[in-house]
Amino acid sequence: MKFQLYTEVALDEDIPKYGFLRGDIGTIVEFYPGSSNQDPGYSLEIFNATGEVLKVITVPESGLRHLTPSSVLSVRELAPTG
């Protein structure tokens, strides 16, 4: 497992279906090891700026990255999804 449960990570890819973008931050809540022909994955809780859960999504391990001391947080409005 590359990422520990209940840690914050950043998306390393856009998730257009939900309006989330690369760099958005979520908290890991579940790990899925995957099979021999499948990447491991994680469920993330994505929160808004006031701490409310927007969505729980599942992302492959390759779609996540660790936060680092040089990571910068920002605020943006979530675009409506269709």
Image: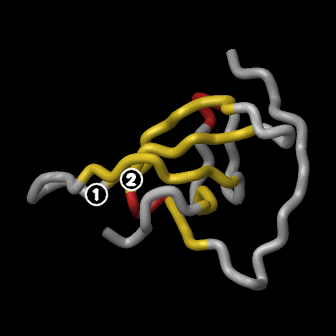
C-alpha gap between disc 1 and disc 2: 6 Å
Check if mark 1's residue and mark 2's residue have beta carbons within 8 Å.
yes
Measuring from the top left, give residue 3's x and y in whole percent. 43, 68
Q: Which mark is residue 40?
A: 1
Dot 1 amino acid type: Pro
Front in this rendered view, residue 12 or 10 = 10
- Give left or right: position of 34 versus 54: left
Q: Which mark is residue 15?
A: none
Measuring from the top left, give residue 67's x and y in whole percent. 65, 73
Answer above or below: position of 8 versus 79.
Answer: below
Measuring from the top left, give residue 72's x and y in whole percent. 83, 71
Give the total of numbered labels: 2
- Give left or right: position of 57 versus 34: right
Q: Which mark is residue 60?
A: 2
For marks 1 and 2, the one nearer the N-term is: 1
Q: Residue furthest left?
A: 36
- Give left or right: position of 49 versus 29: right
Dot 2 amino acid type: Pro
Which residue appears at 33% of the width and 52% of the height? 31
Answer above or below: position of 57 versus 44.
Answer: above
Disc 2: CA contacts within 10 A as few (<14), some (14-19) or many (>=20)? some
Disc 1: CA contacts within 10 A as few (<14), some (14-19) or many (>=20)? some
Which residue appears at 51% of the width and 45% of the height? 44
Indicate the quadrant containing the C terminus: top left, top right, bottom left or bottom right: top right
Which residue appears at 26% of the width and 58% of the height? 39
